[in-house]
Amino acid sequence: MLPFVDNLMPFRYQHLQWTLKGLEMTGVPLIEYDGTKYLPAGISDDTGIYYFIPQIAKLLNVNLDWAILIFFSSIFITSMFLSFFLLFKLFPQKNQKAITIYFILIIFLSCFFRGDIYIFTAISVTTLIPLFLYINANYSNKKILYFLLIFLGFILSIFNFIRSNSATAILIFCLYLIIINKNTKFLLKVSRILGIFAGYLLFLVILNLNIYNERDSFLYNHKIDIKSFPEGHIFWHQVYIGLGFLTNDYGIRYTDDSALEKAKEINPDVIPQSINYEKILQNEVFRIITSNPWFFIKNIFAKLGVIFLYLLIFSNFGLIIVLKNQNHFHLNISFILVFIFNLIFPLLAVPYPSYILGTIAAFNIFAICTLNNYLFNKNQSIKNLFSF
């Protein structure tokens, strides 16, 4: 058994095999070959792993299993040590470190046993929020500051490439705290925001001018219409089957077949996971919500109940700390924005632990900041941390 390999979803493993085969046959990234035809890799799924993992296999001349292990474990270990390093710098006393270790280990142990790309929503919160807070608290040198902000934006963009919107909540967090910082002049706020976006856009430029452009040219030459497939993870498919969280009269179940059957019922010729397929399910979701809003509301509240239960288990007394915290209004708001954004998908799809890892991570990081500031607020870095 290999960590991060055995808990990768079977369909992702299958498509990674096809993508590695496509890379070996064509030399072009993000092309999969299923034995009969070429297709864009990662159709209806998050794209990043279908680029990085086959590249690792090719570069290091290892099989797919080892490439998966190297990819996930290297990011997992780096993120864990970086999280500890940054939080120990922000909260250096022994008691503070004990609090940090407790809440961070909960997050990373959950990620280790859960696996798959879902862990990136939690890892991004656990690593990048402390990174931003550390940058804000410790760097007045403009050259270093802007280099780190550009670097932060670049990493945010990579995380979103690997897992759709896994770092968007952190981007919102950073922008909010920059904007409301009363100790920073307007032009400095603008320049810091531009620094983050410069890094974010830099990766997108590399992605589109090199990776996507090479893929699209290959598909065009082989008469494959890339525009008929959505770029990244399909959304309305998940929202539709998410309505099957509760027993219902619509025949909806939380299975891929349930959505496919409905789309085929409406249009027998529809191509699964295509843009037209998504539009059909989007219309069906809105039809159900408008005709029976109470059914949708019951679904949301049932899912909220399950999410709260998981938070009690994984955040335990950290949840109480967060809910009772009355200090640092703007930091509270910034974390609330992260919570709300990361709750969108489990509320619209299903509240499985995989989908709420980002919310759990945000609660635990907030608990670390809140408890350490409440108990030990004499450290200068903490004063800077909460100077918004």
Image (cartoon, rainbow, N blue to C red):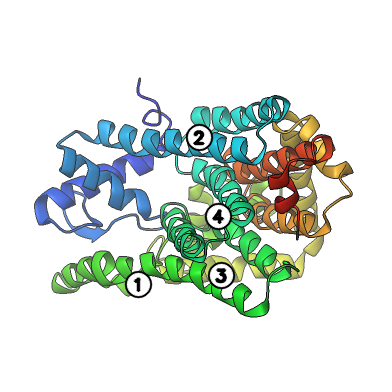
Pointer 2 residue: 80
Distance in Å between CA atoms under marks 3 and 1: 38 Å
Q: Which mark is residue 192?
A: 3
Q: Position of residue 282 (x, y in %)?
A: 57, 68
Distance in Å between CA atoms under marks 1 and 4: 19 Å
Q: Which amino acid type corresponds to the residue marked 1 in the rendered image?
A: Ser
User: Which sits earlier in the primary sequence, circle 1 or circle 4?
Assistant: 1
Q: At 17% from the left edge and 52% from the top edge, which residue is drawn?
A: 22
Q: Which amino acid type corresponds to the residue marked 3 in the rendered image?
A: Arg
Pointer 4 residue: 238
Distance in Å between CA atoms under marks 2 and 3: 26 Å
Pointer 1 residue: 228
Q: Which secondary structure lies at badge 3?
A: helix
Q: Position of residue 31 (x, y in %)?
A: 22, 57
Q: Which amino acid type corresponds to the residue marked 4 in the rendered image?
A: Gln
Q: Is residue 363 left or right of residue 8?
A: right
Q: Where 340 falls versus 185 (above or below)?
A: above
Q: Is residue 137 visible?
A: yes
For residue 357, what is the image quadrant?
Answer: top right
Q: Position of residue 365 (x, y in %)?
A: 67, 41
